Image: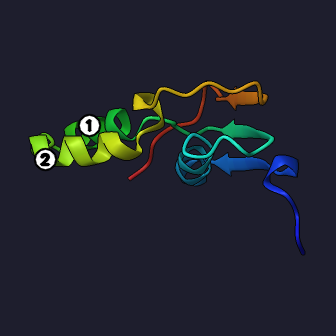
Amino acid sequence: MKIQKENIILFGSSIGDFIASGIFFSNIDYAGLISINGSSSFVTSESFFRELDMRTRLEEIELNILKLYDPKCKDFKTNAPILFSHGENNHISR
């Protein structure tokens, strides 16, 4: 199949949203993004889980590497539709 990126809307749920968001915000050619119960900030999420698991904070070099891929840290402009949806009862389990 030869489907043009301009005709593809990326979808991700939970951890899959990290992948979908990372791809979408790194490439302006996709038609849109649907995010269900996910996160589009690698740095924020990693920091949260490290604190939750009582691990050490991110080292500066780790933080800088994550920022290269973190959608929240990109200067991104698009006219493509983006839908973020998150429920009130989506609990984090270990």
Does 88 appear above or below 47?
above
Tell me which amino acid carries mark 1. Answer: Ser
Residue 66, x across and y down, in percent: 30, 45
Q: In the rendered view, does 8 fall on the left or right side of 70?
A: right
The percent position of residue 85, horizontal first and vertical second, equals 69, 29
Q: Tell me the kind of residue under disc 2.
A: Ile
Residue at image coords 62%, 24% = 77
Q: Which quadrant of the view contains residue 84? A: top right
Tell me if mark 2 has few (under 14), some (14-19) or many (20+) residues whose alpha carbon lies within 10 angstroms of its own.
few
Residue at label 1? 47
Question: How far is disc 1 from disc 2 in space, using C-alphas?
Answer: 14 Å
Name of the residue lying farthest toward the bottom: 1
The residue tagged 2 is: 61
Q: Nearer the viewer, residue 91 or 72?
A: 72
**Residue 72 versus residue 50 in the image, above or below:** above
Tag 1, which secondary structure? helix
- Quick one: label 1 or label 2, which is nearer the N terminus? 1
| Coordinates of residue 81 in the picture (x, y in percent) | 79, 28
Quarter of the rendering containing residue 72: top left
Asked whether residue 55 is in view, the answer is no
As drawn, is 55 to the left or to the right of 16? left
Left or right, residue 73 beside residue 40: left
Closer to us: 14 or 61: 61
Q: Give the secondary structure at mark 2.
A: helix
Q: Is residue 63 visible?
A: yes
**Foreground: disc 1 or disc 2:** 2
Mark 1, Cα crowd under 10 Å, few <14 / some 14-19 / many 20+, is some
**Placement of 75 over or under 39, stated as above or below:** above
At horizontal 58% and vertical 51% (from top left) the residue drawn is: 23
Give the x, y percent position of residue 45.
37, 38
From the viewer's perspective, tell me whether residue 58 is left or right of residue 73: left
| Quadrant (top left, top right, bottom left, bottom right) of the N terminus | bottom right
